[in-house]
Image (cartoon, rainbow, N blue to C red):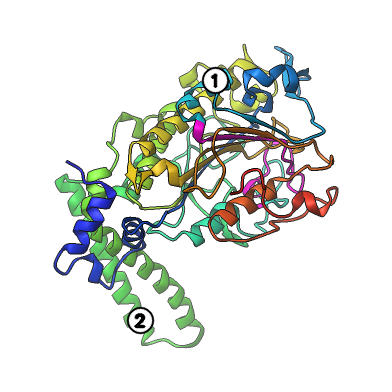
């Protein structure tokens, strides 16, 4: 029977010569020890869909008459259908979700309504609009063009949190594709979707292949003779490379030695990570996900489900505290949902039922988020569960719609942060763009920062068409 996180760390600290006295004591064990002593950890999962997140289909049923109106479809195609849009509000609106009826597209989140917040009305016009805001979606600055992610002006919020909440894998990115546009084929290997950065011009990678992600994160859980031999050879190779570089360094000087130092730092980092993983091997083995056909499937929905399984296991085993998931790109065709056009075409009103398929895609994402939340809620932690200490953020890299204007940028927040945020079953809609009391997406990221000890009152670039108050400080409606 698998040990709970608390049971495992207590037993580990009692072992003779155990991890508690090892010079290779990992951040994983430090976090678990803090947990066993009553400290409250914090984790984040960012789920970014493409082609916008429809604001009108996040509104509780009881508020639809007040908040939803019939509007123009974006770039209507041959099968034009009237689309619903959100009515701009003059004043702040707050409504409890505890007794509300969630929109049908969000029904999978019904069991978590008391740990749910729907945040509407935020703007992000400091970012570029259109097909994608690229790094701006989590960095609050202008980046890229229609087909190119462009320059990285600074760290994105997930990169900042990864540095603040260290772990064996500081940041885990999972995606089905790297390119925003392009063909419908699924991509493999490491990809760069242009969403996450640790610092200026330091983009973070995403793993597009579920099986490769599994091997990278959970290779120590493998038990076959071939996998065990591969693990042994990888360790031997890293040792050889480090020793070889050190030997070569002794014979070099100046610029050549400085270049080798960079390579040496990278290989030593990999070797150190491997040693840390070996130290928590038993816990990883007990909680690694079960590999199934989904991990090698070429069907988009299968791969997305596999990525969410990996994300859940990564959090439960403590391998990372910050995960970003990119389920799709504009070229993705959801054949598993029966879609007859890609995400880009659906956004332009093409296909037999563009609005209906866009809703199905959103429902599928919400279902995967609910699966992830259920696994975290079933894992005890402290006086509650892992979901109590994890915040899942669902939003789009393109604001409110395909070819976004970025005057609205909806967010669905699920979980908590050990009581550091007011994610307690609430719908919040801020006044419309440029109205008194309006707020930008930067203030939401400020709020997340405050919750984990990063007291930032500004983030990214300013929107020159908004006053300073609209873009400064945290959101008091979500703050404790």
Please indicate, yes or no, whether residue 337 appears anywhere in the rendered image: yes
* Residue drawn at x 45%, y 30% as measured from the top left: 370
Q: Is residue 148 left or right of residue 393?
A: right
* Residue drawn at x 69%, y 30% as measured from the top left: 402
Q: Is residue 244 above or below residue 294?
A: below
Query: What span is colored magenta in the figure?
Result: 114-139
- At which x and y percent is residue 456? 65, 60
* Residue drawn at x 74%, y 23% as measured from the top left: 67
* Residue topped by disc 2: 248
* Residue topped by disc 1: 360
* Residue drawn at x 62%, y 51% as measured from the top left: 447
Which marked residue is nearer to the observer: mark 1 or mark 2?
Answer: 1
Residue 122 lies in the magenta stretch: yes
- At which x and y percent is residue 399? 68, 37
Can you say which quadrant of the picture contains the N terminus? top left
Q: CA distance from mark 1 to mark 2?
A: 57 Å
The residue carrying pointer 1 sits among few (fewer than 14), some (14 to 19) or many (20 or more) residues within 10 Å by Cα, namely some
């Amino acid at each position: 029977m698998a040990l709970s996180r608390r049971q495992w760390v207590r037993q580990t600290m009692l072992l003779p010569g155990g991890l508690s006295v090892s010079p290779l004591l990992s951040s994983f064990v430090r976090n678990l020890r803090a947990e066993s002593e009553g400290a409250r950890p914090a984790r984040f999962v960012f789920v970014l869909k493409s082609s916008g997140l429809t604001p009108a289909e996040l509104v509780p049923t009881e508020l639809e008459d007040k908040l939803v109106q019939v509007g123009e479809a974006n770039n209507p195609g041959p099968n034009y259908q009237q689309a619903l849009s959100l009515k701009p509000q003059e004043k702040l609106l707050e409504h409890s979700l505890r007794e509300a009826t969630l929109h049908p597209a969000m029904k999978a989140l019904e069991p978590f309504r008391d740990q749910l917040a729907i945040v509407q009305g935020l703007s992000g016009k400091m970012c570029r609009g259109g097909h994608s805001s690229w790094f701006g979606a989590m960095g609050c600055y202008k980046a890229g063009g229609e087909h190119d992610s462009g320059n990285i002006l600074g760290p994105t919020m997930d990169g900042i949190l990864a540095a603040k909440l260290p772990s064996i894998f500081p940041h885990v990115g999972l995606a089905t594709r790297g390119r925003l546009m392009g063909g419908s084929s699924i991509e493999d290997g490491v990809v760069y979707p242009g969403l996450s950065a640790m610092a200026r011009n330091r983009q973070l990678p995403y793993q597009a292949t579920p099986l490769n992600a599994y091997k990278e994160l959970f290779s120590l859980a493998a038990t076959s003779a071939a996998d065990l031999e591969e693990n042994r050879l990888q360790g031997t190779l890293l040792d050889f490379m480090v020793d070889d570089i050190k030997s070569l360094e002794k014979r070099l000087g100046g610029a050549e030695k400085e270049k080798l130092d960079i390579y040496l730092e990278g290989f030593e980092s990999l070797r150190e990570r491997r040693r840390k993983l070996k130290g928590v091997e038993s816990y990883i083995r007990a909680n690694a996900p079960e590999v199934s056909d989904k991990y090698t499937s070429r069907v988009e929905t299968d791969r997305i489900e596999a990525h969410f399984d990996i994300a859940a296991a990564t959090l439960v085993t403590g391998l990372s505290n910050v995960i970003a998931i990119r389920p799709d790109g504009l070229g993705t065709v959801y054949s598993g949902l029966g879609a007859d056009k890609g995400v880009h075409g659906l956004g332009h009103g093409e296909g037999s039922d563009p609005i209906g398929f866009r809703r199905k895609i959103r429902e599928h994402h919400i279902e995967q988020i609910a699966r992830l939340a259920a696994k975290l809620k079933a894992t005890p932690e402290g006086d509650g569960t892992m979901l109590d200490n994890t915040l899942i953020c669902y939003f789009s890299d393109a604001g409110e719609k395909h070819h976004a204007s970025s005057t609205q940028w909806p967010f669905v927040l699920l979980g908590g942060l050990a009581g550091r945020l007011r994610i307690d079953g609430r719908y919040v809609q801020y006044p419309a763009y440029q109205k008194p009391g309006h707020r930008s997406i930067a203030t939401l990221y400020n709020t997340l920062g405050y919750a984990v000890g990063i007291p930032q009152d500004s983030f990214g670039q300013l929107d020159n068409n908004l006053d300073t108050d609209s873009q400064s400080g945290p959101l008091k409606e979500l703050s404790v």
